[in-house]
Image: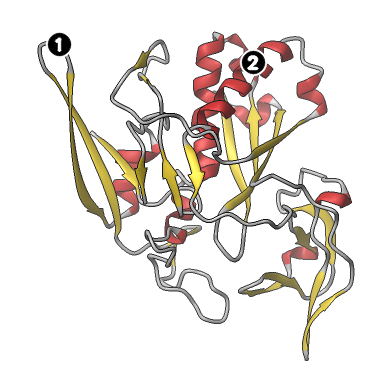
């Protein structure tokens, strides 16, 4: 059984997929499907210096390209913007006032990005806005930004001291304050990753990118309905989810899932699709968090 949260990326999107990887990463299962999107989500990547100098970088590059193609032909935002993509800076000492337009720093902006170990060129970052008594004060201008880009991914190798027994991990670094869309993420690749075959590497990267795109318990409370309205009540002052926190995650309202089960007939698979409400983070972890992300059977509009 598969639970697909409604909605995932931006939480206003359409989904389609032309193949589903099995759990052993070895084969693709073919199901009835729509054509792959030709105008899907626009992802740009920055590869770190350590990764680009790795002896197996060429193999990794092919695996990453395959993974990006999967998501670009699978996800398409329903509402698009002509704005250039700009990545927010971190506030010094994480001291800020949250507003519907994003955080305004109380003291000053750091040179660090919202994932502090990643230093981005000034041309890619938003200007610094301070919280003033009479309103926001912009003390530095926005960079040029990225055209024709909806998500920026930074990918690099990471030390084994961070990895433990992991193959890779992903972190969502920033969301758009107006739409809650993921706009900036990091994928860390561990040493054990390079011992896997290329199709396994691609499946692993596809899985990690899924966490950045919304398959992540930390962003459940930001999900929106088919009309773009937040599913979880928002604080009118900050525009943040308003039901409190459990651990570090905002508590979501009940989330409706598209439940897909399959039955094997004599010579074909039968798909059974129902809707079910998910009300706890525990159900998310059980049904979604540990599933491979390449499970969406065919396009549906949401």
Q: Secondary structure at mark 1?
A: loop
User: 257 or 284: which is nearer to us?
Assistant: 257
**Mark 1 sits on what residue?**
267
Q: Percent x, y for residue 201?
A: 55, 17
Circle 2: element type: helix
Label number found at residue 48: none
Determine crowd level at label 1: few under 14, some 14-19, many 20+ residues with C-alpha closer than 10 A.
few
Q: Is residue 155 left or right of residue 195?
A: right
* Residue shown at 66% from the left, 11% from the top: 59
Q: Nearer the viewer, mark 1 or mark 2?
A: 1
* Nearer to the camera, 267 or 246: 267
Residue 282: % across, % down = 31, 48
Q: Is residue 230 above or below residue 97?
A: above
Q: Position of residue 298 (x, y in %)?
A: 33, 33
Above-or-below relation of 274 to 47: below
Quarter-of-image position of residue 246: bottom left
Query: Which sits earlier in the primary sequence, circle 1 or circle 2?
Result: 2
Q: Residue at x 84, y 61 (%)?
A: 142
Res. 166 in view? no
- The foreground one among 225 and 106 is 225
Q: Is 102 on the left or on the right of 252, as rendered?
A: right
Outermost left residue: 266
Is 116 placed above or below 72 here?
below
Q: Can residue 222 be seen here?
A: yes
Res. 62 mark: 2
């Amino acid at each position: 059984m598969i639970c697909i949260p409604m909605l995932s990326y931006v939480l206003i999107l359409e989904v389609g997929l032309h193949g589903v990887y099995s759990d052993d990463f070895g084969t693709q299962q073919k199901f009835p499907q729509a054509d792959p999107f030709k105008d899907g989500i626009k992802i740009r990547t920055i590869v770190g210096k350590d990764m680009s100098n790795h002896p197996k970088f060429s193999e990794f590059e092919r695996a990453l390209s395959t993974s990006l193609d999967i998501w670009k032909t699978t996800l398409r935002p329903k509402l698009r913007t002509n704005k250039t993509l700009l990545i927010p800076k971190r506030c010094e000492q994480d001291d800020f006032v949250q507003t519907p337009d994003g955080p305004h720093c109380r003291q000053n902006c750091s040179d660090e990005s919202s994932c502090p170990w990643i230093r981005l060129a000034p041309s890619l970052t938003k200007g610094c806005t301070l919280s003033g008594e009479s309103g926001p004060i912009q003390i530095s201008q926005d960079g040029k930004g990225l055209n024709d880009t909806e998500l920026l991914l930074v990918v690099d190798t990471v030390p084994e001291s961070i990895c433990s027994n992991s193959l890779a991990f992903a972190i969502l670094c920033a969301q758009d304050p107006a739409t809650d869309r993921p706009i900036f993420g990091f994928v860390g690749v561990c040493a054990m990753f390079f011992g896997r075959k290329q199709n396994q590497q691609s499946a692993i990267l596809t899985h990690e990118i899924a966490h950045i795109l919304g398959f992540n318990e930390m962003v459940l409370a930001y999900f929106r309905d088919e009309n773009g309205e937040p599913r979880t009540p928002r604080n009118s002052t900050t525009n943040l989810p308003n039901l409190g926190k459990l651990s570090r995650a905002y508590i979501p309202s009940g989330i409706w899932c598209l439940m897909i089960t399959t039955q094997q007939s004599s010579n074909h698979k039968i798909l059974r699709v129902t809707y079910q409400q998910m009300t706890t983070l525990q159900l998310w972890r059980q049904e979604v968090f540990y599933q491979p992300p390449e499970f969406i059977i065919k396009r549906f509009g949401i």
